[in-house]
Amino acid sequence: PFETTLELDCITRDGLLLDVATTMTTARVRVKELFGKDLPGGRSVFTVKFEVKDVAELDSIRNKLLSIRDVVGSKRGQN
């Protein structure tokens, strides 16, 4: 396995952190860090550091996270 980080661009709403955490748990991913930050204009950024087996698993997890309501984008973060 290797560690990677995704930064999620989101529209701020109650329960979003729980939705991200639930998605990661359901995908059976080992999460190393998960935190969020509110930004001006009703936006939030969540950073998730986790382990994956390969790029295919990473793509699958990214697609699951992008399917969460109010998650509008993602990019690989700095490890």
Image (spheres, helix red, strand yellow):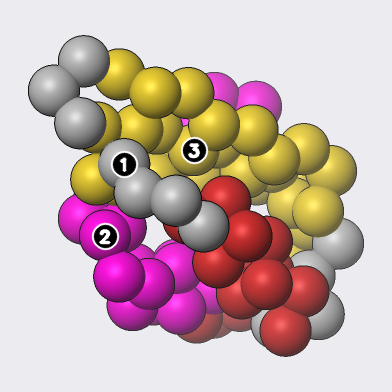
Residue nearer the viewer, 24 or 70: 70
38 is higher (above) or lower (below) than 21: above
Is residue 75 located in the magenta-colored stretch of the structure? yes
Mark 2 to mark 1 CA distance (whole Å): 7 Å
- Decide if residue 20 is in sight here: no
Mark 3 or mark 1, whichever is nearer to me: 1
Callout 2, which amino acid?
Answer: Asp
Percent coordinates x, y for residue 29 in the rendering: 78, 70
**Residues shaded magenta:** 61-79
Q: Is residue 42 shown to the viewer in this render?
A: yes
Q: Give the SS element for disc 3.
A: strand
Q: Is residue 3 left or right of residue 19?
A: right
Q: Residue at x 45, y 68 (%)?
A: 65
> Is label 2 in contact with label 1 (beta carbons under 8 Å)?
yes
Dot 3 surroundings within 10 Å: few (below 14), some, or many (20 or more)? some
Task: Name the kind of residue labelled 1 in the image.
Answer: Thr
- Disc number at residue 70? 2
